[in-house]
Amino acid sequence: MTTNVRDLMHSGVVRCDPDISLGKVARMLAEHHVHSLFIFNDEQLPIGVITDYDVMAGEWLSGDPESLEVMREMTAKELMSSPVEMIEADTPASEAAQRMLAGGIRRLLVIEKQQPIGVISVSDFLADIVSKTTMRREYVSDVMSDAYLVCRGKTPVTAAARAMIESGWRSVVVADAHGKPLGVFSGLDLLSFSDLDRIPDSMLVTEVMHAPLTIRMDATLHEAAKMMIDNHHHRILVIDPEHVDSLPLGVISSFDIVSEMARPDSVWQR
């Protein structure tokens, strides 16, 4: 039986008006615990999407007072990505996974009869994987990334954010002088602040980072996916169990697992 987008999506769409400020966008993202908002016009047509990464990039690329003031006056419409990537509800899920992988897309607006009815994201694929036990490649070591972005605990938030934007990474592993992982810093960590404009330049990543999730290389992808879903995380540090305080061996992300699903020999492609 073919699994369709309808079977995996989460119903409902978190919407925002095009003219709200970036500060309001940040608050809505934090309140709904989502990574993106869909922007609709007066005719209730989707015209764009704005993500936590967009907000972070807009905030931290403002390197001087003049640029910052410009960003504070910007609206969701001015920073959104457009057009909105959409997909029909009855499209095979494997096709959605391939499309997301090819385009580096983390979410698609799901439509039926030209009306938005939900969203399918990387996390939705993970949630379904948790319920399945048979996979052609079973272990974290098969799909994890051996290279990742890392910084010291004394790194300013502004420097870490700029490195993420320039490299395209969505998070940074924070380590001490001996390589011991202290935490993970991501754009979503910043959204807990009520006023992004007042975060001091002297603030360090250790002040806003979140505790890392860790997993062994020989853990199954099912275990990794369930850990991400249960903890609302998109990435886990892969550690050496014999040297737990050393630099991690790698990182496994939700997108790594979706990439596995899109492989021609994956059980999803049968």
Image (cartoon, helix red, strand yellow):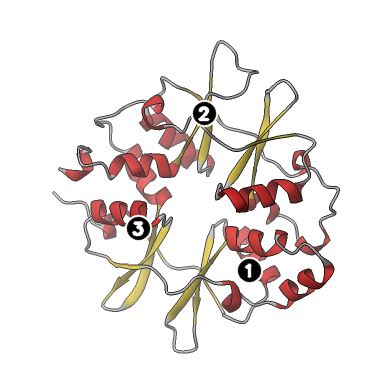
Q: Earlier in the sequence, mark 1 or mark 3?
A: 3
Q: Nearer the viewer, residue 97 or 177?
A: 177
3 left or right, relative to 59: left
Residue located beneath label 2 in the image = 250
Q: Position of residue 54 (x, y in %)?
A: 59, 63
What residue sits 63% from the left and 52% below the top? 187
Residue located beneath label 3 in the image = 9
What residue sits 35% from the left and 58% below the top? 9
Can the viewer see residue 195? no
Mark 3 is surrounded, within 10 Å at the Cα level, by few (under 14), some (14 to 19) or many (20 or more) other residues, namely many
The kind of residue on which mark 1 rests is Val
The answer to whether 175 is drawn above or below residue 114 in the figure is: above
116 left or right, relative to 18: left
Q: Nearer the viewer, mark 2 or mark 1?
A: 2
- The alpha-carbon separation of the residues under discs 1 and 3 comes to 23 Å
Q: Nearer the viewer, mark 1 or mark 3?
A: 1
Q: Residue 25, which numbered label?
A: 1
- The alpha-carbon separation of the residues under discs 2 and 1 comes to 32 Å
